[in-house]
Amino acid sequence: MSLAIEIKNNEIILVDAKVNKSKVQVRTALSFEFSEGLINQNGIVDTDNFALILSQQLSQFDKKEKSCNVCINNSSIIYREIFVPKVDEKRLPFLVRSEMMSALHLTPDYLMDYIPLEEVVKEGNRMYRVLAVAILESAIASYISAFKKANLKINTLDTATNAIIKLVDTFGISEVEHQFIVADVQKGQLKLYLFDEGVYVLARNTRLSSSLLEDTESAVEEVVESISKMNQYTFTRNDKGIQQIIYVGMDEILGDVKERVEQILNIPGKILSESVKKEGLTDFENKHVNAIGVLLRK
């Protein structure tokens, strides 16, 4: 069994799953919220309190394992799509770091990593398109400290975007020849991941002004509007538009969102949990996808 923990700005998702090659069987899962302000761009503000909250929730798991895989999905992570010259792979980390520091005016105390996306040609030059991520070194230290206080060792640290990319690759969602969106519909925000012929293109994050639970109608309208804007954007890239949407997130609302998008925008879609069972992903809720993605290996 493997333990995955997704950390949002005010929510934690715990997933205990059995992972075998490309098959994932969720054994136990739970989620809980905590007060706003406990996490910010500097990481975990109060590591003692965070460790206490985490330990209390972990007590519900019948597990002796003391290691975990963590998905950071909050404001302490910075994403940036960049293009760097095609060079020897050993030089790529330096180029990515230099480009990130220059583009975002980051200080040297940021740690950086990147996900290679594709090789392209720009103005006659061969380039790599990469998704770069940055996080303060002190933020990483705060996560390690908090988990250590909760008697947990972090095996891997990952991001939500990379978790989605791995999920799409592992379960055959990327094996298409059209543009599609993975729409992560959460209680207070919407994240849209655009893929073109299976290759990740970009992500857009929108904070919803209406609550999906308290004012469902208004929130659904906001989601539809955001998807419409993303669809319009795709025509600036090519003439294909969005041909399918994969929905993840809050199960309570996904059916309503899917139906409304199909009615208004005429874009077909499917809810992830209903379409991947035969691919080896079972017994999970759609809000668990980032935690599950962390457990996958490319």
Image (tube, rainbow, N blue to C red):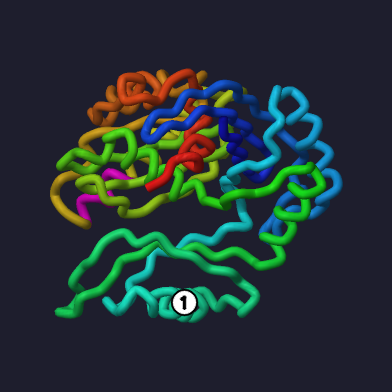
- Where is residue 65 drawn, in percent x and y? 68, 35
Q: Is residue 10 left or right of residue 284?
A: right
- Residue 173 at least partly seen: yes
Q: Is residue 283 left or right of residue 148?
A: left
The residue that appears at 28% across and 44% down in the rendered structure is 231
> Depth check: 179 or 132 in front?
132
Task: Inspect the magenta stretch and tell me whether residue 188 lies in it.
Answer: no
Task: Inspect the magenta stretch and tell me whether residue 233 lies in it.
Answer: yes
Q: Is residue 258 left or right of residue 293?
A: left
User: Is 128 placed above or below 39 here?
Assistant: below
Question: At numbered mark 1, what does the secondary structure look like: helix, strand or loop?
Answer: helix
Total marks placed: 1
> Depth check: 221 or 188 in front?
188
User: Is 229 placed above or below 136 here?
Assistant: above
Crowd tier of the residue under label 1, counting other residues whose Cα lies within 10 Å: few below 14, some 14–19, many 20 or above:
few
- Residue 190 at least partly seen: no
The residue that appears at 61% across and 71% down in the rendered structure is 110
The residue that appears at 26% across and 61% down in the rendered structure is 118
Query: According to the image, label 1 marks what residue?
Result: 103
Q: Is residue 7 left or right of residue 54?
A: left
The residue that appears at 47% across and 32% down in the rendered structure is 19
- Where is residue 181 drawn, in percent x and y? 32, 40
Question: Tag 1: residue type?
Answer: Ala
- Where is residue 5 drawn, in percent x and y? 62, 39
- Where is residue 213 drawn, in percent x and y? 59, 23
Provide the residue span drawn in magenta: 230-236
> Depth check: 295 or 47 in front?
295
Image quarter (top left, top right, bottom left or bottom right) of the N terminus: top right
Magenta region, mostly helix, strand or loop?
helix
